[in-house]
Amino acid sequence: EHPEWWDLLCNINTGKITVSPALLMPTAGGGSGGGHAKSQTESLRRSLDSVSLSRNRSFSSREGKPDKWNNLDTDFIQDLMLAIERHYGEVAIRAKVENYVRHFMSLVPLYEYERDGMTRLGDSAHIAAAEKTGVDGYSISPGDKESREREIGFYQNRIEGFIGTQAYDNAVADYQSMHASSFIRGIDIAHMVYCLRNSTNLDVNEVEAIYKHLDEQVVTDEQVTELLASLPQSQGGLQPLAYGFYHPSLAIRLYTVRLFEKIEGNQAGARYVRSTNFFHQCAFSNLRHAFAC
């Protein structure tokens, strides 16, 4: 009902995502601009058509062999439904949706760079350097690169439908504003935190490179605050960084202690440290004492 009130309609009960037919209307300017807008909408519709899930095909397939409906979107919907069934709080549900959108947005500049050799939603030179070094940017390891290519292929129609829209222009403006006011330059903090939180195929050298970059780049109080922005309490706070306390590598443990000392010196960071798991606090205290000796 009233499709003119919405652009996308998400039915939590069935998992179906519907594109408003009102989006098919050409823009007032007509001509090539209207045709471009229509092609973008049709591209978006084709992409979202694959998300139209029925309860018996999607939610009942949590067990047994995966079928063609088990894709990146169904994984997200199933995770969301499971969280709702387990009575997760609103903050946790919002965090899952936010992560899904943020991950999609991280793929847009990569797709633009691979297609056009440049992007308005990221640093093209940074992406190019990351492709070569493999330690400080968008592609940490070969496994992540393979996963990235699979995800870009899955979201390609949706990304093409997104590029050129008003939402895309707003995202570009936000990125440029954020980049101009950023205190941490030369590394992708959000991506490094994502890798520490989710990646399972990083070798010792890659993990050490991440902690080394964080230790070198996060120095001032403003930089610590910017780092904390990528570590919200609703997603575990300092948990991804705290894993470094238990790493077999002495260098990684040292980088982790030095990083936590800087965070503890920040007013907001001190509360983050106090809110970590008791065992993390004990590990931090013991290692700091050991390195001081």
Image (spheres, grey):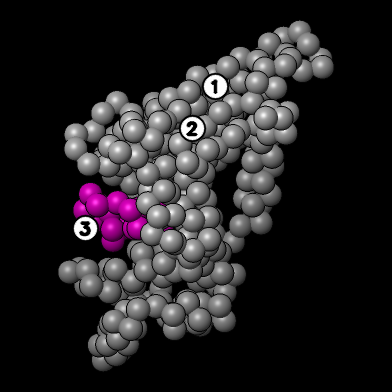
Q: Secondary structure at mark 1?
A: helix
Give the main secondary structure of the magenta stretch.
helix
Report which residue position mark 2 lands on: 16
Residue 60 seen in render: yes
Q: Quadrant of the C terminus?
A: bottom left
Image marks 3 and 1: residues in contact by CB distance under 8 Å = no
Q: Position of residue 110 (x, y in %)?
A: 46, 34
Q: Which residues are magenta?
A: 192-209
Instruction: Write the residue at 61% across / 20% down.
Output: 41
x and y, in percent, of residue 107 in the image: 46, 37
Which mark is first along the chain, 1 or 3?
1
Q: Which quadrant of the view contains residue 277?
A: bottom left
- The residue that mark 3 highlights is 204
Q: What residue is shown at x 50% (from left), y 19% (from top)?
A: 46
Secondary structure at badge 3 equals: helix
Q: Residue at x 33, y 31 (%)?
A: 57
Kind of residue indicated by mark 3: Val
Residue 155 seen in this snapshot: no
- Secondary structure beneath label 2: loop
- Point out the frontmost of discs 1 and 2: 2
Label 1 with label 2: CB-CB less than 8 Å: no
